[in-house]
Amino acid sequence: MTDQDSAQDSSGAASNSKEPDGPERRTLADVFRGPSDSAGRWLDDVPRLTINERKVAAAGIRKLQSRRLTLYTDLPASDEIDRLPEMFDQAFAQWCAYFHVEQAEHADWRLTGFLMKDKVRFWNVGLLPPGLPPFKNGYAQNFEFWLYDQPSDYYRRHLLLHEGTHGFMNTMLGACGPPWYMEGVAELLSTHHWDGKQLALGHMPADRDEVPHWGRVRIIKDAIAEGRPMRLQGVIDFSGRAYIENEPYAWCWAIASLLDRHPRYQERFRSLYKNVLKPDFNARFRALMADDWQPLCEEWQLLVMGLEYGYDVPAMAVDFTPGKPMAAEGARVTVSAERGWQNTGMQLEAGVTYEMRATGRYQVADQPQIWWSEPGGVSIRYYQGRPLGLLLAALRPDQPEPNSTSALLRPAAVGLGLTLTPEQTGTLYFRINDSAAELDDNEGRLTVAIRRVQ
């Protein structure tokens, strides 16, 4: 299930709808009211829908087919609409690879989808069965899924792939897992790139123009601006009923994106599909991440507080290994312009005064020409209120308080030099001031000399 960024009419039935009699039957209004938790598992007692092809065609509903999808729609013919089944076939191959399903063993696998502009038309010809649980914008059940037309070609494809991911997991794995995982994986894989010929699932969009009406980054940035950041455990604790609104989808996409792209967590996250039928899925997830739970929660903070289109998860991965006391003669540290927070391997002691001096020249952008910076930063462009390329430092306690704000979110400006007397002992980190989405055009290194002040 998913929601779009622009509100759609989901208020109820039109007056000419043919609704079945009886107190046990749902009305058309019920069908469009909100999501149902039953979307996350295979339903043994729900057969495939019987379709009267003649009646459907007479109602102006077209049938599009490919090897893996039969799609019924009342949208007019166009290249974008008519190529959806072809795109879906490419998605099937990528789902199989992601979930370790052997394609050759499922030669006859196919979903049936219903892409609707006029919901009443589908209701009147039996394509919205009375027993269907309530849904607002999209719903998947066994081998079938339903979705409404969307305000952009991209978001229509996104919703179709989202429901297709649910359908694949339900039919191949038997379930989709708890809500955060079910929706997180569906959002992760349906965020895509499609050039009309080749499909790539699990795409990190570079800018908002690439994904019109998707809005997941904007939703999180707005929540942060309003002082409403979500803790990692809060996202995991979302109930299925929370997904009547857009915001939970954004948070679940964010955690799935972090776990799936992070070099330390990816393998474990991608193994979770084996547990979708287990009632203790979340407990198994916590056990799998037990040794890294505190670092994961901290990297979650860094992600949501610095989220941008194109956020580079691997480049922002943090090494949380505790540092060792600095040698008496001091030390020299090399800092890359191409990465986020970098562990110096040095522990600074509380109450001791240290002097830092930085030198070097490095690239912080390459368009429309190469932008060079030194540790003091580029004063003609700012990021988060500080000059682009400015050298930053943070001292992270080796045993931070649970649920505390990461010290890496409270950096000190070093620039060309800084004298620092820490209030608590911790490991020293450096990075240059730049967006996590713009590290790929950086290049070069700088050097920081550190010594105790006698």
Image (spheres, grey):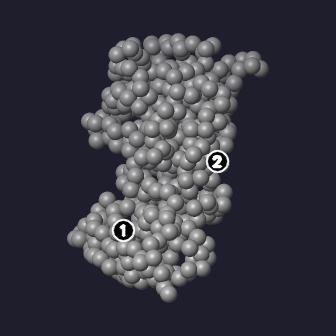
Left or right for 277, reference 376: right
Outermost residue toward the bottom in this view = 454
Label 2 sits on residue: 233
Say the numbered circle drawn on residue 19.
none
Q: Residue at x 68, y 18 (%)?
A: 20
Expressed as whole percent of the image width and height from the top left, the position of residue 217 reads: 49, 54
Amino acid type of disc 2?
Answer: Gln
Image quadrant of residue 152? top left
Q: Nearer the viewer, residue 281 or 18?
A: 281
Above or below — where is 330 with respect to 140?
below
Above or below — where is 274 with respect to 332?
above
Q: Residue at x 49, y 63 (%)?
A: 323
Outermost residue toward the left in this view = 369
Say the numbered circle drawn on residue 335.
1
Expressed as whole percent of the image width and height from the top left, the position of residue 19 reads: 66, 22
Amino acid type of disc 1?
Answer: Val
